[in-house]
Amino acid sequence: MDKLNIKLWTLAAKGQIVPKRSMLKTPRQIAAIRKSAALNTAVLDHVAAHIREGMSTAEIDRLVYDFTTEHGGIPAPLNYEGFPKSVCTSLNNVVCHGIPSEHEFLQEGDILNVDVSTILNGYYSDASRMFTIGSISSEAARLVRVTQECVDLGLKAAKPWGHLGDIAYAINSHARKHGYSVVEDIGGHGIGLDFHEEPFVSYVTPKGSEMVLVPGMMFTIEPMVNEGSPDFFVDEDNDWTVYTIDDGLSAQVEYMVLVTDTKVEVLSK
Ligand code: MF3
Ligand code: CO
């Protein structure tokens, strides 16, 4: 047994949840996934440079498809479990998994999450940002700002040999302090060799709980923060689009991170 295995085994014997060795990426895998993540960030930058009032969300989908494929990548959402487009665009009261549409146009006051996921040479990456259209209400602006702060605080709380719950606690307590709620049943995930890997990452669990953050782990920090109730429903027609149950606004920011020996590093944001 190598040193790492002994350490993991000792933690497990103390009742800690530790990752399987298959969840720890090798240096070669990390190098390849970094390239995928760099392209993923470039796609988000491309969207940021071109998004504007009056544009349809289908135009954002084309921006993502064209830029990704021109750079040798494949948009991971396209045909993923039947998802029909290359990117998720989640507008206002849409919590996540919004489907780009020719009939949906960006209007002044909108808040939009654009969630980009990329496959490059078989390696996966995933990150999302919030965009605001024209001048938005102070309520919407506060939700977007606090959601961004939640993710930055979650990242700050993430330490090698700490716990996933430390991230969740930082996020959930900041959201609640501002009167918001964090969605419970949809969360983050491991990533890199596949789109969605173990572990499931909750953002409502207590400090010190859940899986130990072991160097080599890669996962997303992507809380969905709702203005009102954390509850949601899924569109019955398309089986994808997730809406807030009370029609309140929802925001989300997603970072893809790697646990190293010394820190938790952002690979795509
Ligand atoms: N990027 C989303 C996530 O974080 C992807 C959802 S699956 C899709 O899990 F098919 F809708 F893209
Ligand atoms: Co994700």
Image (spheres, rainbow, N blue to C red):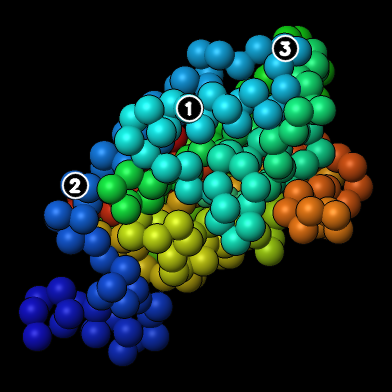
N-terminal of the pair, mark 1 or mark 3, is: 3
- Name the residue tied to disc 1: 66
The crowding category of the residue bearing disc 3, from other C-alpha atoms within 10 Å (few below 14, some 14 to 19, many at least 20), is some
| Quarter holding residue 87 | top right
Q: Quadrant of the C terminus?
A: top left
In space, the residues marked 1 and 3 are separated at their CA atoms by 20 Å
Q: Residue furthest right?
A: 246
Of circles 1 and 2, the one toward us is: 1
Query: Callout 1: few (<14), some (14-19), or many (20+) C-alpha neighbours within 10 Å?
Result: some
Quarter of the image with the N terminus is bottom left
The residue located at (72%, 22%) in the rendering is 56
Residue shown at the point (32%, 53%) measured from the top left? 122
Element type where label 3 sits in the image: loop
| Residue 17 rendering spot, x and y as whole percentages | 40, 78
Q: Which residue is mark 3?
A: 53
Q: Are marks 2 and 3 in contact (CB under 8 Å)?
A: no
Q: Is residue 14 above or below residue 68?
A: below
> Which of the two labelled residues, at mark 2 and mark 3, occupies the earlier sequence position?
2
The residue sitting at 89% across, 42% down in the picture is 247
Residue 33 in the image, given as x and y percentages of width and height: 28, 48
Estimate the spatial distance between the alpha carbons at disc 1 and disc 2, rounded to whole Å: 25 Å
- Looking at the rendered structure, the kind of residue marked 2 is Ala
Q: Nearer the viewer, residue 213 or 166?
A: 213
Q: Which mark is residue 99?
A: none
Q: Say if residue 127 shows up in the picture.
A: yes
Q: Mark 2: give few (<14), some (14-19) or many (20+) Cα within 10 Å.
A: few
Please, what is the three-letter code of the amino acid marked with disc 1? Asp
Residue 180 in view in this figure = no
- Foreground of the two, 214 or 34: 34
> Residue 31 has which mark?
2
Percent x, y of residue 3: 9, 76
